[in-house]
Image (tube, grey):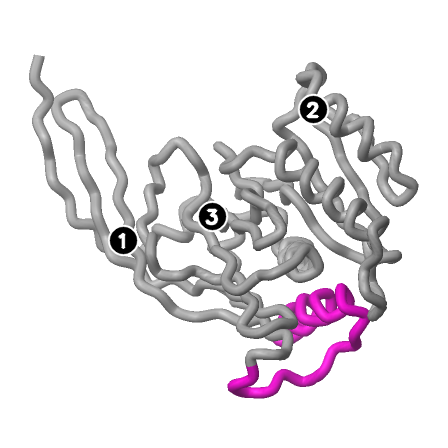
Amino acid sequence: MKEVVPQFTYQDTVLTFHLENLGETVSPVEADLLTNLDACTEVSVTPTKGGHTVKADIQPLLKKDVYDGADLRFIEKLLGSVNVLTPYISDHDEVLGLSTIGHDGLDAHIYPSFQTWLQSDGLNPEVIRASETAIYSAFGEAWQPPKEHNHLVVRVGTDQASFHALDYQDNEDATLERTANMQLTIPWLQTLGNCACLASDGSDRSMHPDGKYASLYKLKPHNIDDLRQVLSLVVGLGTLAAHAPLTFDETLLFKDVEWEVQSFPKTD
């Protein structure tokens, strides 16, 4: 079993970011960002072994009122800093990852531990409701039962999609190319807005298990118009990450895959 540390989680109004990529020595830009975050009343930055932990209590943002300038500056500072301080795609499993965070959305990277959990248990009703409740809270709203075919409510769920997997293995005499088609359970999140969501758009459904990065695929934004919607999706994802197991079997996801193998002899 492999242990994992989530890049970020959300529980009890607190967003927690584990910045494992930042060691004891940080760049001047990273140092300034950490200092500026730590100066916020709602944020604490704690050095940890091999990195830093950032905790942000977003309780002041969980309201129905329109965000004022101070609210928007806080979100920009928090999410903008995270966008710089976290790697675009990690080389090790971080459960869920964030990248390209801006006013019009974010990308969410799905790692093997999270995908293995989806394949085995899926998102049960309790976890779905917790994530939807978190998304609603960003607008100061209470959870309500989902309405079918309504693009103006919060919903969290999963779909089934076909992915193409490709990896390479070397031995003394040849390079083996392995390919397979897999059915994966993929998550999606819809926030308040007209079809405002985060999902796999089908444009890139290729996985490279032997690749440089641990990420399997990513979810992309659609019809995201402002930072409040972005924040709502971050807390929705963070709630899912907080419920995901912290250990997983590395061999399970590809255990029963039927690979097609081609051998390419090595030449001197």
Question: Which image quarter holds the C terminus?
Answer: top left
User: Which residue does the image show at 61% across and 79% down from the upper left?
Assistant: 152
Q: Nearer the viewer, mark 1 or mark 3?
A: 1
Measure how far apart labels 3 and 2 are at the Cα level.
28 Å
Q: Is residue 122 left or right of residue 201?
A: right
How many neighbours does mark 3 have within 10 angstroms: few (below 14), some (14-19), or many (20 or more)? Answer: many
Residue 30: which disc? 2
User: Which residue corresponds to mark 3?
Assistant: 112
Count residues near mark 1 (Cα–Cα under 10 Å), then give few for <14, some for 14-19, many for 20+.
Answer: some
Image height check: is 62 above or below 106? below
Question: Which residues are drawn in magenta?
Answer: 125-150
> What residue would you read off at disc 1?
164
Mark closest to the chain's N terminus, 3 or 2: 2
Front position among marks 3 and 2:
2
At label 2, which amino acid type do we have?
Glu
Q: Residue at x 39, y 69 (%)?
A: 160
- CB-based contact (under 8 Å), mark 1 and mark 2: no
> Could you say where residue 225 lies in the image, as x and y percent from the top left?
60, 61
What is the spatial separation of the Cα atoms under label 1 and label 2, in whole angstroms? 37 Å
Instruction: Name the side, left or right, on which 265 lies relative to 132.
Output: left
Residue 133 among those drawn in magenta: yes
Circle nearer the N terminus (1, 3): 3
Q: How many marks?
A: 3
The image shows residue 11 at horizontal and vertical percentages of 77, 56
